[in-house]
Amino acid sequence: MTQTLTPHNAFDLLMAGNQRFVAGVPEHPNQDAARRTQTAPSQQPFAVLFGCSDSRLAAEIIFDRGLGDLFVVRTAGHVAGTEVLGSIEFGVNVLNTPLVVVLGHDSCGAVAAARSALENGQTPGGFVRDIVERVTPSVLAARAAGRDSAEEILAEHIEHTVDLLLERSRVLAEAVATGRTAVIGLSYRLADGSAQFVTSRGLDPAVPSAS
């Protein structure tokens, strides 16, 4: 993969792979011994993918990609701490990836736990509590806007995460402001395998990419 891709090119490439996965016709690109040898000296991923740790969200599978294509960062509920921000900045500033993706999904346990904590006061113990507390502002914001369904709260959490990354990372904000990188939010549907567009900063998916 070359680093001449624009954010829009990278988005199109990513979504084309998801469409193949949904249709049941994956190509499994870049998964052979030749690719392994090619990427051993260095990596040039075309996207940073920051997603939930859920076992059903295996990035290279659902986007039909292979070795060296995606720089993947995952946490439960895609909550972003300093380690996550540093990892994303590494992908953008050192590896020059033109696209950052925040990937949420339906039936997210972290979102469900945050909703439950607000409704009945039952908060998990240990460090899981920290995850729930970081998701809670998204649930509150969605409800304040009259959006109380699970799908609406998920969309709010994805958008909140996108905004949080840009607010906390000057490196990422500058990359988006100069057009070098775009940040998008996608929502994955477990039943059919599709990744649905939620929001973007620095990219308009309705505009065809330049050939």
Image (tube, rainbow, N blue to C red):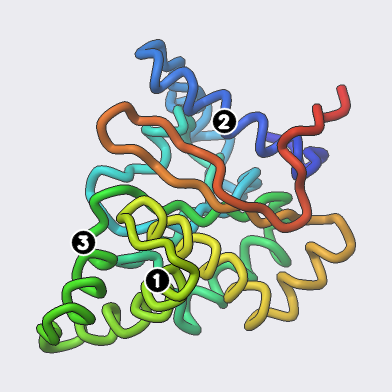
Q: Which residue is drawn at 46% across and 15% down?
A: 27
Kindly identify which residue carries mark 2: 15
Of label 2 and label 1, which has the lower sequence position? 2
Q: What residue type is labelled 2?
A: Met
- Quadrant of res 74: bottom left
Kindly identify which residue carries mark 1: 143
Q: Report the front residue among 206 and 127.
A: 206
Q: Nearer the viewer, mark 3 or mark 2?
A: 3
Query: Horizontally, is 105 left or right of 30 in the view?
Result: left
Query: Horizontally, is 121 left or right of 101 in the view?
Result: left
Q: Is mark 3 on a helix, strand or loop?
A: helix
Reply above or below: 206 against 162: above
Q: Nearer the viewer, mark 2 or mark 1?
A: 1
Going by the picture, which residue comes out furthest to the front? 146
Kindly identify which residue carries mark 3: 109
Q: Which amino acid does label 1 sit on?
A: Arg
- Quadrant of res 32: top left
